[in-house]
Image (tube, rainbow, N blue to C red):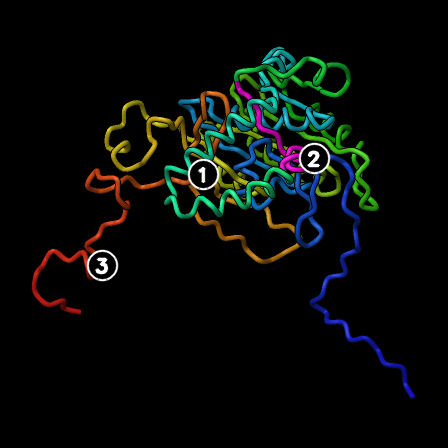
C-alpha cells in the first residue's frame, strides 16, 4: 500500500516557528512578524500593535510647527528605557544635546491620576447603566497593566529623561550638518545594524535609528535628490535583515513633488503631522475638544509584512492632544453637535421620527 502523501499547496508559506521573544519591548504579531512600540500607546493601537520590526517609518514634517519632534522623542525614549541601542542623526551641530529634551516615563502615581481622569471622562460620555461593565473589567485591565508597561510606557513631557539612560555607549550620535554626502551616515547605519542580525529568530538585542530632517538645507547634500533616495533604499534593505526599526523625518516642502512621492513610496509606515491654525473659529465649530488640540496626525500608509491582506483603518486623521500638558494622546476626530446642543452629532432629520413635516412620510 502506497504511503499517504501530504498535499501542500503552492500558495502556502513555510514560516518557521519562532518562540516568543523574552526581550522586553518586543511582542509577537500575526504571520511571524514582531512589533516594537512607538512610545505612544494610542499610536500602537492605531497601527495594529506598533512599528513592525525591520520596517522603515517616515514622518512628514510641518513647516509651521515641530510636532514631529513629539513623535521622535517618544520613539527614542521608549528604546532607551528598554535598554535598546540607539543611533541618532541630526543636522544640529551637537546632536547629543538633544538627548536632554527626551521625556521621562511617568511614575505609577501619575499613571493612577491619568487613569482616574480617563475613567471620569468615560463616565461623562457613557450612560450610567453601562458603568457596571467597566467596573467588571477593571480588575482584568489592572492585571495586564504591568505587562503593557514592558512594551510601551507613558511619557511625561515635562520631565526630562534621567541621564543614566543615554550615557555611555548606548547612544551613537551623528551630526549631518555640512556633510558633503551621505556616505558617512550610510556607513554608520550599516555598522550599527550589523549588531542586530536576524538569522535564527533570536532576540538577544535590538536597535533603533532616528534621523531628523534628512533633507535639511544645512546639509550640503540636500540638493542631491538621487543620492538621498538611494540612501533611503539602501537603509530599507538593511533593515529587512536586522532586528531594528528606523524613523526618518523630513520636510516635504523642500523636495520636488516627484521626489516627495518617491520618498513616500519607500516608507513602510508613512505619517504626517500638521499644526492647527490659531483661533480657527470655523474649525472650532466643527470639532469637539478643539481647544485641547495642538495638531493633527495623518496615517497614510501602514506596514504589511508577510501578508497581502490590507489593513483598513476606521479613521486616518487623528487629533494630537496634550493631556494635562504632560501626556501625548491621539484621538479620533468627533464632529460637534450641529445645533450646539449636548445631543448626538448626527442630524436628526435623517430618521423617521425626526421629520419636521406633520404629514405622511414619503418613502
Is 286 left, or right, of 90 in this rendering?
Answer: left
Does the image show residue 216? yes
* Residue on which disc 2 sits: 25
* Residue on which disc 3 sits: 351
Q: Nearer the viewer, mark 3 or mark 1?
A: 3
In the image, 276 versus 224, the foreground residue is 276
Q: Residue at x 79, y 55 (%)?
A: 16
Q: Residues within 10 Å of mark 3 (few under 14, many from 20)?
A: few
The first of marks 3 and 2 along the sequence is 2
The kind of secondary structure element at disc 1 is: strand
Q: Residue at x 66, y 53 (%)?
A: 30
Res. 298 mark: 1
x and y percent of residue 80 in the render? 69, 24
Q: Residues within 10 Å of mark 2 (few under 14, many from 20)?
A: many
x and y percent of residue 181 in the render? 64, 23
Q: Residues within 10 Å of mark 1 (few under 14, many from 20)?
A: some
Does the image show residue 255? no
Judge whether residue 147 is colored magenta.
Answer: yes
Q: Tell me which segment is drawn in magenta.
A: 145-157
The kind of secondary structure element at disc 3 is: loop
Amino acid at each position: 500500500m502506497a504511503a499517504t502523501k501530504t498535499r501542500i499547496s503552492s500558495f502556502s508559506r513555510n514560516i518557521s516557528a519562532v518562540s516568543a521573544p523574552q526581550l522586553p519591548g518586543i511582542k509577537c504579531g500575526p504571520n511571524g512578524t514582531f512589533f516594537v512600540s512607538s512610545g505612544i500607546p494610542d499610536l500602537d493601537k492605531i497601527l495594529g500593535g506598533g512599528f513592525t520590526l525591520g520596517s522603515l517609518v517616515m514622518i512628514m514634517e510641518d513647516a509651521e510647527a515641530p510636532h514631529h519632534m513629539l513623535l521622535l522623542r517618544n520613539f527614542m525614549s521608549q528604546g532607551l528605557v528598554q535598554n535598546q541601542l540607539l543611533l541618532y542623526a541630526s543636522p544640529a551641530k551637537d546632536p547629543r544635546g538633544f538627548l536632554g529634551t527626551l521625556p521621562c516615563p511617568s511614575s505609577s502615581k501619575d499613571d493612577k491620576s491619568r487613569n482616574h481622569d480617563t475613567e471620569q471622562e468615560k463616565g461623562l460620555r457613557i450612560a450610567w447603566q453601562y458603568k457596571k461593565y467597566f467596573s467588571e473589567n477593571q480588575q482584568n485591565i489592572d492585571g495586564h497593566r504591568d505587562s503593557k508597561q514592558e512594551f510601551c510606557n507613558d511619557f511625561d513631557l515635562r520631565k526630562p529623561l534621567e541621564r543614566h539612560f543615554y550615557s555611555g555607549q548606548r547612544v551613537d550620535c551623528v551630526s549631518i550638518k555640512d556633510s558633503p554626502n551621505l556616505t558617512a551616515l550610510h556607513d554608520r547605519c550599516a555598522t550599527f545594524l550589523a549588531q542586530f542580525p536576524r538569522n535564527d529568530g533570536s532576540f538577544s538585542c535590538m536597535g533603533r535609528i532616528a534621523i531628523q530632517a534628512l533633507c535639511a538645507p544645512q546639509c550640503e547634500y540636500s540638493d542631491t535628490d538621487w543620492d538621498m533616495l538611494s540612501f533611503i533604499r539602501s537603509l530599507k534593505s538593511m533593515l529587512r535583515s536586522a532586528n531594528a526599526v528606523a524613523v526618518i523625518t523630513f520636510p516635504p516642502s523642500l523636495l520636488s513633488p516627484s521626489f516627495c512621492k518617491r520618498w513616500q513610496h519607500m516608507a513602510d509606515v508613512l505619517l504626517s503631522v500638521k499644526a492647527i491654525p490659531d483661533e480657527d473659529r470655523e474649525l472650532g465649530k466643527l470639532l469637539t475638544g478643539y481647544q485641547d488640540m495642538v495638531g493633527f496626525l495623518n496615517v497614510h500608509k501602514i506596514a504589511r509584512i508577510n501578508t497581502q491582506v490590507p489593513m483598513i483603518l476606521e479613521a486616518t486623521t487623528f487629533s494630537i492632544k496634550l493631556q494635562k500638558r504632560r501626556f501625548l494622546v491621539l484621538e479620533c476626530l468627533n464632529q460637534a453637535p450641529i445645533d450646539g446642543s449636548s445631543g448626538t452629532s448626527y442630524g436628526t432629520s435623517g430618521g423617521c421620527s425626526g421629520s419636521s413635516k406633520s404629514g405622511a412620510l414619503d418613502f
